[in-house]
């Protein structure tokens, strides 16, 4: 499929029109060193806080405000990192490139702007600490440090220099199916890891996926970032979670609804559609209002009638349709997605050729779904 080549001749201006940046997110500045995602300020939260006890106290306790009382926190030295150029910004604050003074290691430092983002900062640190305690994952950004500087809480994560998946699609056009499959495998494996450990991301979108390399699509590596909405399954409101145009139908009401792993699966469907077409599945022309998109998410079926969908394979359409089921109970789990025929095509070819098909991640799918 040559869809990405056909679309690559379109100007960035036109692509930005048909795939706008929805809602608040970190925006990386043109010309800056491209890296990771960060932001806010509130009471200090420590990288060293109670990691050894996470499995004992349980995930619900870990994500409770009481788990992070100020007196229980041990801050790292404020002089451990030198903050240099600004590499991104958002409603919550800025992202600076950090250099560890002792080793020269680079990090992306999210600096909180004000206290109203306090809960989001706490959720992000709690989620990243839990992930680190569980051994981390190659497709999830690694937490390096947390400290307070001049009254601002700073989260340091690994520096990822390739920029957002969103910008890769906008600037270079949609991915071919083979490349999209590799990209989605990275993302879905990360989400499956989160769900295995009781964490829902709650704000999956192309802006929250960073790539290791800026100028290549083959053998790139995707990493999930921005865990400010993350937490266990729970009743929730729209104040707690992600970006409206990527939220599942069950979370679109004013009072919110039960946020389960199926909500992340819906967002994965939106990401896959965008990666293959350069368009949002419920805003094909890139000019709908948020209210219109919200209404379509709740009531309209996903469509493949647009000209940019003509090259999409039946298997890819089937997977997208399953991910974008209105009923959350009808969506596959993240582990199931990895076994869908579209996701396993490359693995089947490798097996037929007698090559090494060893999975790249230690976690393996348990169940399968079949193509309709």
Image (cartoon, grey):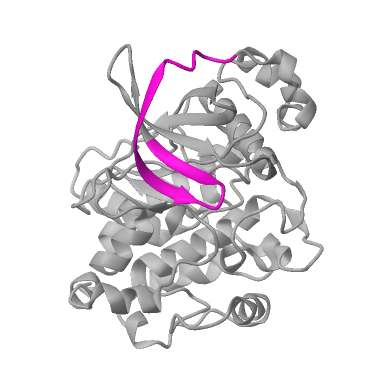
* Residue 223 seen in render: yes
Q: In this orientation, which residue lies closer to the viewer: 149 or 100? A: 149
Q: In this orientation, which residue lies closer to the viewer: 237 or 107? A: 107
Give the left or right position of residue 240, taking residue 124 as reference.
right
Relative to residue 128, is residue 336 depicted above or below? below
- Main SS of the magenta segment? strand
Relative to residue 238, is residue 94 depicted above or below? above
At x 32%, y 75%, the residue is 15
Residue 82 is one of the magenta-drawn residues: yes
At x 66%, y 16%, the residue is 73
Give the left or right position of residue 86, taking residue 192 as reference.
left
Q: In this orientation, which residue lies closer to the viewer: 25 or 231? A: 25
Q: In this orientation, which residue lies closer to the viewer: 371 or 55? A: 55
The picture places residue 282, in percent across and down from the top left corner, at: 53, 78
Q: Residue 298 appears in which quarter of the rendering?
A: bottom right
Residue 102 is one of the magenta-drawn residues: no
The picture places residue 35, in percent across and down from the top left corner, at: 34, 42
Q: Quadrant of the N terminus?
A: bottom left
At x 55%, y 64%, the residue is 23
Q: Residue 102 appears in which quarter of the rendering?
A: top left
At x 49%, y 57%, the residue is 205
The picture places residue 299, in percent across and down from the top left corner, at: 67, 81
The picture places residue 130, in percent across and down from the top left corner, at: 59, 27
Relative to residue 148, is residue 275 depicted above or below? below
Span shown in magenta = 75-96
Relative to residue 66, is residue 260 depicted above or below? below
């Amino acid at each position: 499929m040559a869809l990405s080549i056909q679309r690559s001749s379109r100007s960035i201006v036109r692509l930005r029109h048909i795939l706008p940046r929805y809602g608040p997110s970190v925006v990386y500045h043109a010309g800056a060193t491209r890296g990771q995602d960060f932001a806010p300020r509130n009471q200090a939260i420590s990288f060293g806080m109670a990691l050894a006890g996470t499995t004992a106290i349980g995930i619900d306790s870990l994500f409770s405000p009481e788990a992070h009382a100020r007196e229980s926190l041990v801050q790292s030295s404020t002089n451990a990192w030198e903050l240099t150029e600004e590499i991104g910004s958002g409603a919550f604050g800025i992202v600076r490139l950090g250099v560890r003074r002792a080793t020269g290691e680079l990090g992306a430092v999210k600096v909180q702007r004000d206290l109203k983002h306090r809960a989001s900062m706490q959720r992000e640190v709690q989620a990243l600490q839990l992930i680190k305690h569980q051994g981390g994952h190659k497709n999830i950004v690694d937490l390096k440090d947390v400290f307070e500087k001049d009254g601002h809480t700073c989260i340091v994560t690994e520096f990822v220099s390739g920029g957002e998946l969103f910008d890769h699609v906008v600037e270079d056009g949609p991915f071919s199916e083979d490349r999209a499959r590799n990209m989605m495998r990275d993302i879905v494996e990360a989400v499956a890891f989160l769900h295995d450990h009781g964490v829902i991301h709650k704000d999956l979108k192309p802006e929250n996926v960073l790539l290791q390399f800026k100028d290549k699509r083959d053998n790139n590596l995707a990493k999930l970032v921005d865990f400010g909405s993350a937490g266990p399954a729970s009743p929730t409101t729209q104040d707690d979670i992600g970006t409206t145009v990527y939220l599942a139908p069950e979370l679109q009401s004013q009072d919110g609804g039960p946020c389960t792993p199926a909500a992340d699966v819906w967002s994965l469907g939106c990401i896959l559609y965008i990666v293959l077409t350069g368009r949002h599945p419920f805003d094909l022309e890139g000019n709908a209002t948020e209210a219109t998109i919200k209404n379509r998410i709740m009531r309209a079926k996903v469509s493949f009638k647009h000209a940019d969908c003509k090259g999409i394979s039946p298997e890819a359409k089937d997977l997208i349709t399953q991910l974008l089921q209105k009923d959350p109970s009808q969506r596959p789990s993240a582990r199931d997605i990895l076994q869908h025929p579209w996701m396993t095509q490359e693995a089947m070819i490798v097996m037929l050729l007698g090559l090494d098909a060893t999975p790249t991640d230690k976690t393996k799918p348990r169940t399968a779904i079949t193509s309709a």
